[in-house]
Image (cartoon, rainbow, N blue to C red):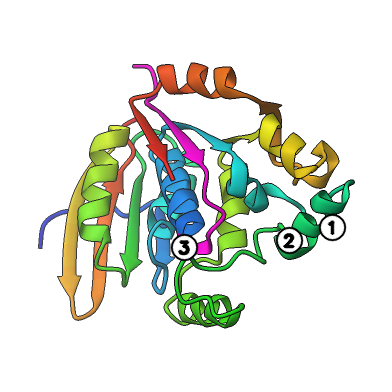
Amino acid sequence: MTQEKEADLVLDLKGLVCPMPVVRVSQAMKRLDVGAVIEAVATDPAVVADMRAWARTTGNELLSMEQSGGLFTFRLRKVK
Amino acid sequence: MEPKKLTMVVFSGDMDKAVAAFNIATGAAASGWEVTMFFTFWGIKLVQQGGLTGRSLFGRMLGLMNRGGINRVGPSRLNFLGAGRWMFKRMMKSHGAAPLAELQKLAGELDVKMIACQMSMDVMEIRRDQLIPEVAEVGGVAAMLEEAGQSQATLFI
């Protein structure tokens, strides 16, 4: 187990499809302070490519992306 | 760093193309882009409130046979007098896709700037007060080009 900072916000994105996971993550990020970590769970396989691209575009950091069964769990840190 | 900018000319009034347009608009806005949607010709239907429009005989006929409003638009293929629209709405719902009206509302909340084409409105006899309140302004080609000239991406849908 790696030492992980506990998430400041947990988002349930299950059942949502494009563009909603990106929209919900973006809306949630706006409410958080720099340095905060979001952990989200989604079922849309597009989040693998989309969250990576979204993080690069917005300058935030995708800490991890894990797939287990049909669930995609990812962690993002707000950089700006 | 200046935010990136996207300008879209939404010419189509088809449901499928509107889904693509609002999907891209909301996705871009959520990624920090400034987004402008310029609605022209059939695209005006997407920003109409949905009531009857027109003053002249032809204008009224158009308003009746081409009724606007985002919930009334049908897909570009397989519409079959509205059966296709019903089917696509059901399928989008069952697969968890956000309904078109919700995407449009979201676009407004994410500060997507919506501009309606004055000339299309004049020709089709649609008044400003018959459009949804999310429409920030009514303008022409110069208004669209000013936005497009500052954009990294410009789409015609």
From the image, tell me which residue sits under label 1: B52
Query: How far from the left and from the top, in percent, is residue B121?
Result: 73, 38
Residue A26 visible to an observer of this rendering:
no
Image position of A43 with respect to B35: above or below: below
Question: Of helix, strand and loop, which one carries label 3?
Answer: helix
Cα separation between marks 3 and 1: 23 Å
Q: Earlier in the sequence, mark 3 or mark 1?
A: 3
Residue B50 lies in what quarter of the image? bottom right
Label 1 CA crowd tier, 10 Å (few <14, some 14–19, many 20+): some
Looking at the rendered structure, whether the residues under marks 3 and 1 are on a common chain is answered as yes
Q: Quadrant of residue B113?
A: top right
Q: CA distance from mark 2 to mark 1?
A: 7 Å
Mark 2, residue position: B67
Give the SS element for disc 1: loop
Q: Which residues are magenta?
A: B1-16
Q: Which amino acid type is marked by label 3? A: Asp
Query: Residue flagged by tag 1: what amino acid is it?
Result: Leu
Residue at the (57%, 68%) spot, across then down = B74
Whole-percent x, y for residue B94 in the image: 47, 82
Disc 3 target residue: B16
